[in-house]
Every structure is written in C-alpha cells, then in structure tokens.
Image (tube, rainbow, N blue to C red):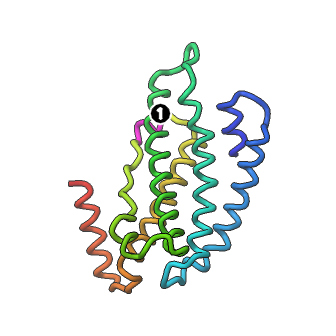
Amino acid sequence: MVSERFNLFRGGTKSKIARKVTILQWRAGAARRNLAPIMARTTSLSRPIVEALYTEALVLADEVRAVFAAGTRAPQIGEDAFLRLALSTEGLKTTTRMMHVLAWLLNQRALFSGELSENQVRLHGGLPPDRGSDERQLALLEPETRELIADTERLHQRIARLDEAWRQHFEMVSPARAFQERIGREFGRLG
C-alpha cells in the first residue's frame, strides 16, 4: 500500500526508498502488535513504550512525507485545483499532527535520558490539541490517503491519552467521572 502511494506520486517504479518505507511500515505494525498488551496494562510511562511509539511515529511520518510531497510539485495540465487544495490543506494538518507527536515523544525520550527534568517536560512538553480533518476535503482524496490521515489521527489520540494519563501521574479516575470530563472537553471543543 505504501509503495503504491509512493509510486502514484513519484510516477515511477518501486524505488529503494519505497521498499524501505514498506519494510519500516511492516516493522512498525509488528511493534504495534507487540506493544498492544503492554499498553493495555500500563500504569506508568516507560522507555520501551516511548521507543516503540517513536519508531511507529517515524515510520508514519516518513509515509506522510512521501505521500504529501506531491503537493510541492508544479500543477499538471488538467489537474483539479480543488484536489490540489485538499491535498495541500490536509497534508499541512497531517504533517503538523505528526510533528507534534514526534516532539512529544522526543521530550519523553529526553526525560528518560536525563536531558530534561520532569518539571520542564510537564511545563513545556504538552501535546497540542489536534485539528481534525475536513470531511469535505477528505472526500476529494484517494482512499489510501484518507486511511493514512486516519492513521495519524489515531496515533495522535493514543499519544493524547498517554499525555493526559502521565500528567495525572496515571491516577485512576472513576469511569463515570472520566466520562463526564470527556463530555465536557468535547463540548468545550465544539463551543
């Protein structure tokens, strides 16, 4: 799938980079499958969790770069301007989302290696909120590109949950209270 997207925008045969991206994506999928049991039972943030997420994020960021690099080329004759605009807009949101995720993970890595204090990370290392995709613009994009965007949104959501839990020192909150807070955040986001 990655190589097909890469070829679509590069207009050529499968290159070394596309093969590398495919291999890295496979490895990230394997890491994600191996990480699932750890994430389900974790009560703290550990170096293996951060490293696995960092690897997954790097692979996803490389795939995002490969797909959205097409927006930097000159328009082709007969190319739909609205499609190009949708590709540019969603590409900017997607790359920004991935940079926020990578920055958060790099801060966590710096914390584990002693380069930053916990106080520094708590004060300045928060994950910014995500700007969701525009459904009208997504409808113009290819299904593979929409799936890639959805993958980045899911990763951001996972990291946001980890960030929130880490900031609360992984304290368990009653499910009813957590649901009320979630509803409050959603209404706050809409209003």
Quadrant location, the C terminus: bottom left
Task: Residue at 47% x, 65% y: name it.
Answer: 107
Asked whether 137 falls inside the magenta stretch, the response is yes
Q: Residues within 10 Å of mark 1 (few under 14, many from 20)?
A: some
For residue 142, what is the image quadrant?
top right
Q: Name which residue lies at 52% across and 36% down.
A: 141
**Secondary structure predominantly adopted by residues drawn in magenta:** helix
For this orientation, the residue located farthest to the left is 191
Decide which of 2, 97 is in the foreground and name it. Answer: 97
Could you say where residue 156 lies in the image, as x and y percent from the top left?
47, 59
* 188 shown above or below 86: below
96 in the magenta segment:
no
Q: Nearer the viewer, residue 74 or 189?
A: 74
Q: Position of residue 169 (x, y in %)?
A: 39, 82
Tell me what residue is drawn at x 58 percent, y 45 percent: 64
Residue 178, picture quadrant: bottom left
* Segment colored magenta: 135-139
The residue under label 1 is: 88
- Above or below residue 181? Residue 71 is above
Q: Position of residue 93 (x, y in %)?
A: 43, 44
Q: Farthest residue toward the front? A: 115
Q: Residue at x 72, y 61 (%)?
A: 27
Q: Quadrant of residue 74?
A: top right
Q: Where residue 30 sits in the image (x, y, percent)? A: 71, 66
Quadrant for the N terminus, please: top right
Of 97 and 7, nearer the camera is 97
SS of the residue at dot 1? Answer: helix
**Residue type, label 1:** Ser
